[in-house]
Image: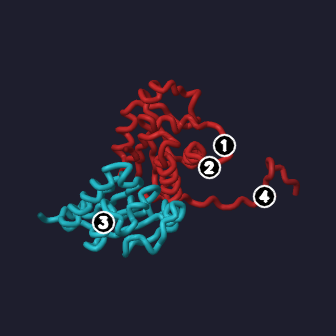
Amino acid sequence: MEPDKKNNSLGIIIARTSIMTGSAMQAVDLGVGALRKGQEVGVFLLSDGVWNGLKNAGDVSDKLNQLVKDGASLHISDEHARAAGLPRDKVIEGAEFIDDIYKDLVNMVMEKWDKVIIC
Amino acid sequence: MLNTGGMGAATKTERPKKKKKDMGKTLTILLLRGPYISEYADLATNVALKAKKMGYKVNLFLYLDGAWLAHIKTEKEYSNAGEWLRWAIKKGVTVKACHRCSEARDLTEDDIIPGVEISGLYGFLDMLAESDKVLTFTG
């Protein structure tokens, strides 16, 4: 299927861990589907959602890792990662740590992504 | 020559007001969770504040337990979403709370932060109609 040129990018904001809700997995699954259809996919982890960025943690983490390998961008709130004690060397390779999270998040939501989902 | 002007006439140099940025787009945020049970209220208010600062028009609609956010009226010794909500209103974010949700929680105009309008869902539809993007904090 040809990608819709008007809706060619999907932003996924994850603010919860995979054990708090099944919706983190559903959101990443949507990302896999969007990527397969040729859409650009960006994932932004903040709040408790930063734990999904831990590599080799199974579940959402493994799927997210594959999503990044397949071309999605992964952004992690530095502030929340530090608050959670998430070691930088244990996150999924290719992840970008974001300093000014709200500025970058608003920019992505308003200017970069065509559609946004939050879980 | 006598200065016959009013208070402060010709003595005070007024700084030119900074023209506010206008990005020409509208962000609407729907909050369905109450404060302190998760970080959603904090995230919603902080995103609203930053988006407003960046020059976007911002609407915030408080729905279901999100209506409780408007109830944090007093100063606290710690940062809290109520403080950010008051700041957001001061900065020009339009905030409405669902009428039915507020009434069900016995939240009246007297109980909530001044500047929050108790509105029917049509108020939310108006927000949606003018929005370029909508962020929903739920779950």
Respond whether the residues carrying marks 4 and 3 are from the same subunit.
no
Which residue in the protein does label 3 denote? Answer: A62
The residue shown at (38%, 56%) is: A14
Kind of residue indicated by mark 2: Ser
Q: Which chain carries label 1?
A: B
Which chain is depicted cyan?
A
Chain of the residue that carries numbered disc 2 in the rendered image: B
Nearer to us of marks 4 and 2 is 2
Residue at 51% across, 24% down: B106
Instruction: Confirm whether residue B133 shows in the render.
Output: no
Q: Of residues B43 and A15, which is closer to you in this image?
A: A15
Q: What numbered label is drawn on residue B12?
A: 4
Circle 2 sits on which residue? B79
Whole-number angstrom distance, CA of label 3 to CA of label 1: 41 Å
User: Neighbour class for label 4 at 10 Å: few (<14), some, many (≥20)?
Assistant: few
Q: Do the residues labelled 3 and 1 touch (CB within 8 Å)?
A: no
Chain assignment, label 3: A
Colour of chain B in the rendered structure image: red
The residues tagged by marks 2 and 3 sit, at their Cα atoms, a distance apart of 35 Å
Graded by Cα atoms within 10 Å as few (under 14), some (14 to 19) or many (20 or more), the crowding at tag 3 reads: some
Q: What residue type is labelled 4?
A: Lys
For the residues bearing labels 2 and 1, Cβ distance under 8 angstroms:
yes
Inspect the image, locate mark 3, and give the three-letter code of the amino acid beneath it: Asp
Front: mark 1 or 4:
1
Does A119 sit above or below residue B33?
below
Residue identified by numbered label 1: B76
In 3D space, how far apart are the residues under numbered discs 4 and 3 (Cα atoms)?
64 Å
Q: Is residue B116 left or right of residue A74?
A: right
Disc 2, SS: loop
The verdict on a common chain for dots 2 and 3 is no
Q: Hey, which residue is sitting farthest left in the picture?
A: A1
